[in-house]
Amino acid sequence: MTPEVVVCGEAMLLMVAEPGIPLERARAFRASVAGAETNVAAGLSRLGHRVRWLGRVGADPAGRSVLAQLRADGIDTDHAVVDPDAPTGLLLRDSHPARGIDVQYYRAASAASRLGPGELTGESVAGARLVHLTGITAMLSESAHRAVLRLAELARDAGATVSFDPNVRLKLGTPGRWRERVAPLMDLADVVLAGEDELELLGEPGPGPLLVVKHRDKSASCQGIRQEPFPVTAVDPVGAGDGFAVGFLSGMLRGLPYESCMREAAAVAALVVQCANDTDGLPHREGLERALAAFAGAETVHR
């Protein structure tokens, strides 16, 4: 398969507690896949794009489960590395609509952290129109940071657009470390999708990339276009930013004007937060079209 989109990053087994139950009290968990890049991969694949995932998992049941779930979403994992000497990362979290979510990562010395630039080749991105990266991978280890730099270089050589989401997670490093390692990556991208708070931490990129800003009030802006969030009842806010990236990048790949890209981004994000894990709300094309029509109808009634 020649991919339209290539993503590279960490994939973990996600165990989500039953909704509303604090993590320490939970007894029932549901398994799925976690990882900012894998969320974007799943979303773009469901919307009809040919997607390849690059990364590493352990030779363990969690790794086999992760790869099986990626393949079930139609994602090409032929270039994935299965590491016999390191485990697949694990993420435990609870799920609440109106209070802070308890997130526990078990990723130290994981297979994903052993990603290195030597594993990435021009063949893995050949034919791709878009390569999507996040700051999370760069923060996993020094070798993973070099791998991100290498992939950006390969994407440029292949003529692919590079999109980048800082996806700041301070559990992975101090603010200073994020500024040192991740801020320069924004200037290697063609499209940067970043939260307002992330830009305050990292600084804004130079004049090169297209900058899409996700604001604290859940609106977003790009090129003078302001997109308000669609009014939905949120079940779980985790994954909203990745869903936003899915909608925007899909629209961009289809040549839509930025206003339409922003609208689709907001719609996918609104669908994601109505479900209790990162990926259940990611729509297929028909579901997104129905949601956009419903949101448009609600706006008409409101006016």
Image (tube, grey):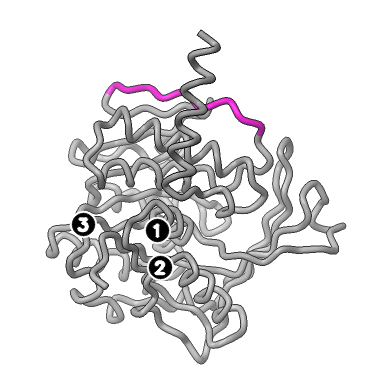
Q: Residues within 10 Å of mark 1 (few under 14, many from 20)?
A: many
In what quadrant of the picture does the N terminus appear?
bottom left
Q: CA distance from mark 3 to mark 2?
A: 16 Å
SS for callout 3: loop
What amino acid is at disc 3?
Arg
SS for callout 1: helix
Q: Is residue 266 left or right of residue 33?
A: left
229 in the magenta segment = yes
Q: Are marks 2 and 1 in contact (CB under 8 Å)?
A: yes
Residue in the picture at 67% in, 49% down: 276
In the image, 39 versus 289, the foreground residue is 289
Vertically, is 161 above or below 158? above
Q: Residues within 10 Å of mark 2 (few under 14, many from 20)?
A: many
Magenta residues, as a range? 224-233
Q: Position of residue 239 (x, y in %)?
A: 54, 48
Question: Sequence-wise, which precedes: disc 3 or disc 2?
Answer: 2
Q: CA distance from mark 2 to mark 1?
A: 7 Å
Residue behind mark 3: 129
Snapshot quadrant of residue 40? bottom left
Residue behind mark 1: 45
Residue behind mark 2: 75
What amino acid is at disc 1?
Ser
What amino acid is at disc 2?
Ile
How many marks do you count on the picture? 3
